[in-house]
Image (cartoon, rainbow, N blue to C red):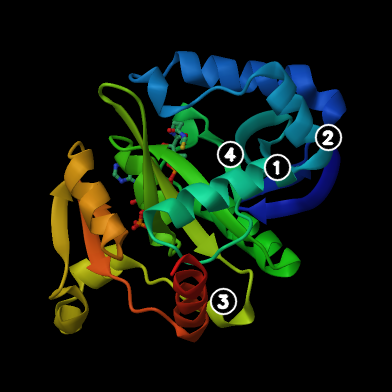
Amino acid sequence: MIRLEEDAYRGYSLCKMQESDFVFVKSFLDNQRSMLDIIEFFYPYKDEELLAVLTSGCFWGLFDGAKLIATFAIDFDEEYAITLANLINSFYDIGIERVYESSGLMVAEEYRGQGIAKYLLKLACDEAKKRRIAICGVVHTQNVASMSSFFSMGFEMRATWRLSDGYDFIYLLKRFDKAEFDDEGINFQNVLQSKCNCDKIKDVIRVTNTHTKEQNALLFDGYVGVGCQDTEIYFKKKEQNHYEQESTHRCNRIKG
Ligand SMILES: CC(C)(COP(=O)(O)OP(=O)(O)OC[C@H]1O[C@@H](n2cnc3c(N)ncnc32)[C@H](O)[C@@H]1OP(=O)(O)O)[C@@H](O)C(=O)NCCC(=O)NCCS
């Protein structure tokens, strides 16, 4: 591992994990996953996937002394980035070409609720901005803690995927592939709690997190998920920015 910063967050140190850390990282993830009430909340890497992210992706590890307490990564697999972009465009065509998966978000049980997930998500956003790429998290629809973390960093729900009955996942996108997207995305949780932002929440449609059909209908209609609370996801009609409008027109011209 490469030590990046000694006192990176609340006295914890930040490292970039590497291929040689495979066994160490795998045992941290397996151990933490085995303690989850719902283990499906953390979709495990296949060995070759973990190795690939450690080797060619960006894999962060946060340490309390010598103890690994949290992980997060961006996978730079180009082929998968195209597959993810196609999936997102198939719900509502925004003409995006590549979307890189962010994965491996795990905070050790006794360290949760200290803002560590948000710190790691901020790191990933900074890296994505530097590289001018879009990133996407794949989250179980009942994993409110994880969804809240992504939504609170301005990620937008853009697609769904059903693994099997009762195991639905959502795709949460954050774009940095063009400079005009840098300031997009609001912290909806904050908006909901604030009395003076009623105009921002008046057009919001709430859907129970297990109602995939209704969610899909909204996504196909140009709505995006912007927040969640307990068992509900909040959708808002996306106002297309200039780049997306052009891109949609371009796609419609090609189709038509
Ligand atoms: C999901 C997880 C990474 C969150 O980590 P964390 O460090 O505790 O999260 P943070 O303290 O940074 O909180 C981030 C946001 O989520 C919210 N949140 C955190 N835990 C929550 C919970 N149990 N219920 C509801 N919201 C929660 C926080 O309030 C915060 O939102 P805000 O900014 O709007 O206040 C952690 O619970 C975890 O590791 N879970 C097990 C593995 C997992 O599910 N990984 C995700 C795979 S996609």
Confirm or deny contact between disc 4 and disc 2 (CB under 8 A): no
Q: Which of 153 and 119 is in front in this view?
A: 153
* Label 3 environment density (alpha carbons within 10 Å; few <14, some 14–19, many ≥20): some
Residue at image coords 63%, 76%: 178
Q: Which of marks 1 and 2 is nearer the N terminus?
A: 2
**Residue pointed to by mark 3:** 182
Determine whether the beta carbon of the residue marked 4 sits less than 8 angstroms from the nearest atom of ligand 1. yes
User: Could you tell whether 237 is left or right of 10 in the image?
Assistant: left
Q: How far apart are marks 4 and 2 (CA)?
A: 14 Å
The residue type indicated by label 4 comes to Ser
Helix, strand or loop at label 3? It is: loop
Camera-side mark, 4 or 1: 1
Quadrant in which the N terminus is drawn = top right
Amino acid tagged 3: Asp
Would residue 70 be found to the left or right of residue 189 on screen?
right
Mark 2 is on which residue type? Thr
> Disc 4 marks which residue?
103
In which of the image's four quarters is ligand 1 placed? top left
Q: Which of marks 4 and 2 is nearer the N terminus?
A: 2
Q: Element under label 1?
A: helix
**Quarter of the rendering containing residue 169:** top left
At horizontal 30% and vertical 41% (from top left) the residue drawn is 144
Q: Mark 1 points at which residue?
A: 79
Say if 183 sits above or below 192 in the image: below
The disc placed on residue 55 is 2
